[in-house]
Amino acid sequence: MVSVELKNVVKRYGETTAVGGVSLTIGKGELFFLLGPSGCGKTTALRMVAGFITPDEGEILFDGRDISRTPPHKRNVGMVFQTYALFPHMTVAQNISYGLRFRKLEAAEKKRRLDDVMERTRLGGLGARVPAELSGGQQQRVALARALVIQPDALLLDEPLSNLDTKLRVEVREEIKRIHDEFKITALYVTHDQDEALSLADRLAIMKDGAIVQIGTPEEIYARPRSAFVASFVGETNLLEARAAARDGRQGFDTPAGWIPAPAGGGKPEKALISVRPESVRLGSPDGAAVTGKARSVKFFGGTVKIELELEGGATLTAAAPGASAAGRWKKGDTAGITLEERDVVILE
Amino acid sequence: MSLSSSERSGAGVYIGTGLIAAFFALFLFYPLYYVFKKSLMPEGAFSLSFFKLLFSNPVMARSIVNSLLIAMNVTLLSGALGFIFATLTVKTDLPAKNFWGNMFLIPMILPPFVGAIGVKYILGRFGMVNTLLMHWGVIGARNPIDWLGAPFWGVVILETLHLFPIMYLNVVGSYALMDPSLEEAARGLGARGLSLFRSVKAPLLAPGFFAGASVVFIWAMTDLGTPLLFEYRAVIPVQIFNSLQESKENLLGYALVVVALAITAVFFVASKYLFARRKVEMAAFGRTSGRLIKLGLPGKILITAALAVFIALALVPHISVALVSLSKEWFMTALPEAWTFEYYGKVFTHPMSFSSVKNSLAFSGLAVVATLITGGAIAYMISRKRFRGRWILDVCAMMPLAVPGVVLAFGYVQVFFGTFLDPRVNPVALLVISYAVRRLPLVVRALYAGFQQTSVTLEEASASLGASPATTLRRVTFPLIRANMLGAAILAFAFSMLEVSDSLILAMEEKFYPMTKAIYMLMGRLEDGGMIASAMGVLGVALLAASLAVAQRLLGRKMGDLFRA
């Protein structure tokens, strides 16, 4: 197992810059995510770590050793592909043990490793099948087993769940978490699905237009997004324009949803954008409320109800409330009093 | 050279490209350049004098017109037959469609110049038809009808029978790719009948249709074997062939080659850029058979009967060649009077035929190896590498489709005269090279399809698991494209065994004759020459039939793609 470091890595294709100066460090045993919309360069970054693409500038270090120009077959990284890339002309067992051919191991050790990984990925009894005879989830586990059996220095996962249906995706997500916990391996996981990233990552980096815009733990990213992009890409949010205004001697901001105090230690910009998660918007009786809004739509999502409100100034604000208590309480056209959970409001840069 | 990285085009790519470019330069472009120079600059300065001579010479002028007419007729007939048969088997509820689908491919296995042997026995002055007519008293014994007095139509019919399956395969292929939901959508929007055909179906079928048609046109215009056996001399390929037989250099031959090349080039370019490569991306999954036209019982019976009659007539040349090869005596009777297998024995004992079979096996085998290596390298680079000038490689690989065998062979004879490759001294190297060059497009296409179907990701997976590029090639890439490699090799081998133009022109001494040249020479002999030639023809047909059957299994529906320009 190694630590993986990207130092100012750049990759250009003609005029377009796919990755423009990315730097990050993945600690030993860490499950690190690159999250971003399609075309943001996250897959290019991953493929550079795998060795399929050579960076134009910068270095990729494994435990401090520069491997930017090492061909992929000498890097000892395990990779799980979006399409799994299982060899269709080989059985499950042959697929998994393929990488062991190129490692100087006793036959008995190879057998032991194969049996061990198949058991740990719950593939026992499927060794003689060919990939076409497996379900999507099983194929996914074979791809994982094949990457893990070589005891790679790092594990790379390229959108590994995107070919699974929603229900299976959640199951396999848990499986990957369990397997990562068990193998404790340095892993780089690329996805555009924020649920995957938030629920699995030890830390994650948000990418946009070939650059990293924020790195942190899932909680940090969700609770303290630094930009409007991060705030709206990771989870849902309300973005409101705010203007500095002191009240009762306290620094704060006037927003369409009322006045909020400035967070301690933050900057004091004249104008700012604030982010409020829907679940931090509290709805109550309009009587005596400082700010009210009119419900433009009420959408039921099972666990939660989302209420879109039109504020007095014309701005809109979405509130989310637990489904059980909110269902039936709010109807389209109702007027509600609005308060914001002050500690959940984020002033964006 | 790294397998897994599409953009790591290191030294290997450039060395490979360089070698391939050298090969093309020496064995494709230089001979063509030489022919052009000789005919356009006869005395070192540009002049069109030869062309004036060409068109003022009535035989030459007639040959050009005849060849064009043959090609047009063959293309129109093949196109019509191919389209009708494909529509019947794909778009209607005709019973036994698979059976008919296979039957339509059978005529393809008969090289028309072999069929010509059979036709001569049937339609000759004292052939089967006249004998029967005499027997029935329809015509007198002293004035048989000269059926082959119009060899033009004999050539057209035999070539059409051989080539319409190519059109059939192409149209079926286009239908298979056409998403039925497009047709349904058009119907939903109100298109019916002719308007539906014009607005939706024809534009989607056109690329496949014209790609096939240009191959058919070029093939028919430059086929040497069939007119030669019908002794139909006033056509371009026979005139080119004859110009080489004369002891002194006949410069008209050069001009004729340039004319042939110009015509084929026009067709090739037209089909490739006017219609075809506007790539019509079509349904990849969820394919349904779409709406079938209901023929009704009378229609079914009528069409089935018509198809049966057509196939029966189409097989007459095959059957008669087989009859000739098995007949002990066949003269002035409807059917042979006595049967024998001795001519099959003679194929392997007669010195000329036996050495020709050995020669053909050796030349074709070597050509397959050469074309697989060259074609494999080209297909690999085109599909896996990104480098400047990639398209040039692609164009070069497809060039031989536009360069007829007679043209190439003519160029070889002229260019390599007096060199160590001189075919007058020993034609083996040039025969092998010409076979290989002529099959290159087919092999490149089959292997390219294989590489395209095999996801690069599999190669990357192999590399990430620790396999070196060579190991990846051996363990992952080759096994996955094995079917394509085998199919391509088998087809290339069979077509080389039956290659006519190159063999007739380049092999000048008996000890170097390949099968096709031996068949031609044997036909010219009295006694048992025709029977031995027929027996060889039947063996050739059997080989081609078996090869196509195996290739069809290996390559599946994609086989139609191999016969396109």
Image: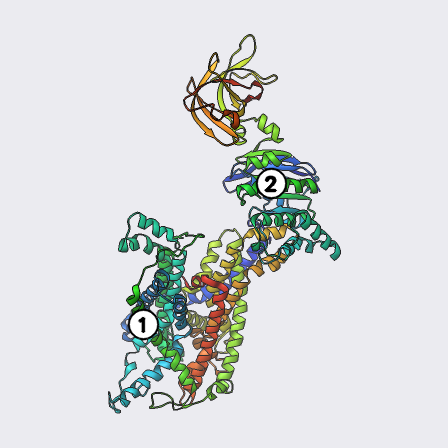
Tell which subunit mark 2 falls on: A
Give the camera-side residue of A133 and B15. Answer: A133
Q: Disc 2 marks which residue?
A: A173
Measured along the vertical axis of the image, is residue B399 above or below residue A121? below
The residue located at (62%, 36%) in the rendering is A200
Q: Is residue B517 visible?
A: no
Residue B513 x, y percent position in the rendering: 48, 80
Could you give the CA–CA distance between mark 1 and mark 2, rounded to whole angstroms?
62 Å
Question: Would you identify the image quadrant in which residue A297 lies?
Answer: top left
Which residue reaches farthest top?
Answer: A248
Q: Is residue B93 visible?
A: yes
Q: Is residue B424 left or right of residue A268?
A: left
The residue located at (45%, 27%) in the rendering is A298
* Quadrant location, the N terminus of chain B: bottom right
**Label 2 sits on what residue type?**
Arg
Callout 1 secondary element: helix
Measured along the vertical axis of the image, is residue B144 above or below residue B76? below
Q: Disc 1 marks which residue?
A: B305
Measured along the vertical axis of the image, is residue A182 above or below residue B162? above
Residue B319 x, y percent position in the rendering: 39, 80
Give the camera-side residue of A325 and A2. Answer: A325
